Amino acid sequence: MKRATSVTQALTLWPVDQHQVRPGRRHSRPQGQEPVQAVLAFEADDPYAVHLLFPHSHGDAGEMVSWQFARTLLIVGQGTAAGQGDVQVGPHEAAGYLVITLVPEHSIALKFFAARALVAKFAQATIEAVPIDREHERIDWDRELAALLGHRVEVTFREADGCFGRTRTGTLAADPTDRAMVVITVPSSVGSLVSWRVSRDELAREVERARRVIRARSRDILLAVPGDAELLLGVGAVQEFLLASFQTALDGAS
C-alpha cells in the first residue's frame, strides 16, 4: 500500500490558563477565551519536523503563523512534558487534553489546550507515513548537502547552431562531493538528461572572458554537451549562481 506523503489534522486550541477547568469537573473541556482553529501539518520529505499553523491575529485574512518543531516532541509530549525551547508539549491534568506552550521571541509564553485524541491520531498518521528511525531514508542527502555548499538553480540554454532560437531548460548545482565543482545538467538532443562537472574557477574565467569580448555573443558562455551539441548560457545567470553559491558557503562557515 502506498504511503501518504503529507498529513494534516485540524485542531482546536483553547488559549487558557493550564489550571482553569470547569469547577468540580476535572475531566471536562478547559474553559477560557475563544478557541483558535489550527492545523497540524507533516511532510514526508521533511520527516523530522511538524508544523502548527493558525491564523495571524493581526495579519491579513488568510495569513497564517507557522511554528515548526520536532515530531518526536509531539510524540513524547503525549505521555510526559517535553521540550525546553520555544515549543513545549505535555499532558494536562484533565484527561483527554494536552498543553501546547509556544514561547514567541521577546514575548510571554502562550499556553493552549488541545484534544489528546486528535494529536495522537495525527502523530500515528505521520508514523505510518514515515516510521520512527527511518526518517533518514526520506531525505535527499545530496540535495541537502548541495544546499549547504551552494544552491541549485534552473537556467535556460540556447542551441548555438540553432537559427530558430531553440532552447533547453537545465540546471546549475553545487557538486555535493566537491565544493570546487559545479554540476551542469541539460536535456540532450534526444531528450535524455546529460550531466557533467565543470570547475567553478573555469566558469568564472569564462564569465570574465565573455565580458571582455565586444560582439553579439559576448554575453554568452559556450558549453559543449558531452556527445551532443554546443549550447549558449547567459553570463548573468552563471555569475549570479557563482556569487550566490559563494555567499551560501560563507554563511554556512560563519
Image: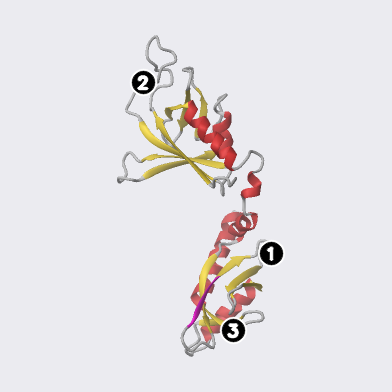
77 vs 187: above or below:
above
- What residue is shown with label 1? 178
Badge 1, how many Cα within 10 Å: few under 14, some, many 20+? few
Q: Which image quadrant for residue 10?
A: top left
Residue 21: image x %, image y %?
Answer: 39, 16
Residue 144: image x %, image y %?
Answer: 61, 55
Residue depth check, mark 1 versus mark 2: number of the one nearer the observer = 2
Q: Which residues are magenta?
A: 166-170
- What residue is shown with label 2? 31
Which residue is found at the position 30% from the left and 45% from the top? 61
| Label 1 residue SS | loop
User: Is 149 left, or right, of 37 in this rendering?
Assistant: right
Which residue is found at the position 37% from the left and 14% from the top? 22
Measure the alpha-carbon separation of dots 1 and 3: 25 Å
Measure the alpha-carbon separation of dots 3 and 2: 70 Å
- What residue is shown with label 3? 230
Q: Which quarter of the figure is the N terminus placed in? A: top right
Which residue is found at the position 40% from the left and 36% from the top? 38
Callout 1 touching callout 3 (CB < 8 Å): no
Residue depth check, mark 1 versus mark 3: number of the one nearer the observer = 3
Q: Amino acid at mark 2?
A: Gln
User: Is 124 left, or right, of 112 in this rendering?
Assistant: right
Q: Amino acid at mark 3?
A: Glu
